[in-house]
């Protein structure tokens, strides 16, 4: 806290600090948003990015509280759903992962390693 107070006492240094926090927090938040549909810690990264931003910005603190509440309510709802709904969510996640791997050209790359060359393995990009 003492270091932060010292930074805050210098207007130029304080502005630079707030810009750095904003850039880093926004970058982490963006990575988290991109990672949400994939297996892994997408939401954790989103909340980490919002936490970084919330350390300096009141709007980010309010958004963090709001998003965490919505996330908790959704997870409570999802936990009460049938195995069919949970299975459909797992299938949707798997489809997003497979589509991403295809678009990024992973299938043609790995296929080339093992001698499988099909046009449909090629990325549309």
Image (cartoon, helix red, strand yellow):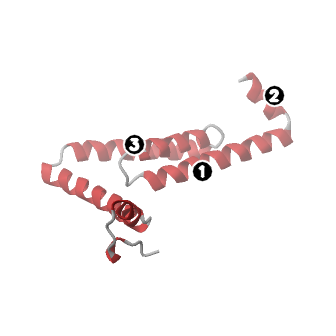
Where residue 111 sits in the image (x, y, percent)?
35, 63
Where residue 36 sits in the image (x, y, percent)?
41, 52
Q: Which label sits in the foreground, 1 or 3?
A: 1
Q: CA distance from mark 3 to mark 2?
A: 34 Å
Chain-order first, disc 1 or disc 3: 1
Residue under the image location 49 percent in, 46 percent down = 46
Where residue 61 sits in the image (x, y, percent)?
56, 41
On the image, numbered disc 1 is attached to which residue?
27
Left or right of residue 74: residue 59: right
Location of the N terminus by quadrant is top right
Q: CA distance from mark 1 to mark 3?
A: 23 Å
Taking the view exactly as shown, the residue that stands out farthest to the top is: 2
Taking the view exactly as shown, the residue that stands out farthest to the front is: 115
Residue under the image location 42 percent in, 45 percent down = 43
Mark 3, Cα crowd under 10 Å, few <14 / some 14-19 / many 20+, is few
The numbered disc on residue 6 is 2
Q: Which label sits in the foreground, 3 or 2?
A: 2
Please tell me in which quadrant of the rendered image residue 3 appears: top right
Left or right of residue 95: residue 47: right
Residue under the image location 68 percent in, 43 percent down = 21
Please tell me in which quadrant of the rendered image residue 49 appears: top right
Mark 1, Cα crowd under 10 Å, few <14 / some 14-19 / many 20+, is some
Q: Are the two marked residues, 1 and 2, in contact with CB atoms closer than 8 angstroms?
A: no
């Amino acid at each position: 806290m003492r270091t932060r107070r010292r930074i805050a006492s210098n207007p130029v240094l304080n502005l630079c600090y707030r810009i750095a926090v904003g850039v880093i927090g926004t970058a982490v938040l963006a990575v988290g948003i991109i990672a949400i549909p994939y297996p892994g810690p997408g939401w954790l990264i989103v909340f980490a990015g919002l936490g970084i931003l919330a350390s300096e910005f009141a709007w980010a603190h309010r958004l963090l509280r709001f998003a965490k509440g919505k996330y908790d309510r959704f997870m409570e709802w999802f936990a009460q759903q049938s195995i069919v709904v949970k299975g459909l969510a797992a299938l949707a996640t798997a489809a997003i992962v497979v589509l991403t791997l295809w678009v990024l050209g992973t299938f043609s790359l790995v296929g080339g390693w093992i001698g499988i060359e099909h046009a449909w393995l090629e990325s549309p990009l």
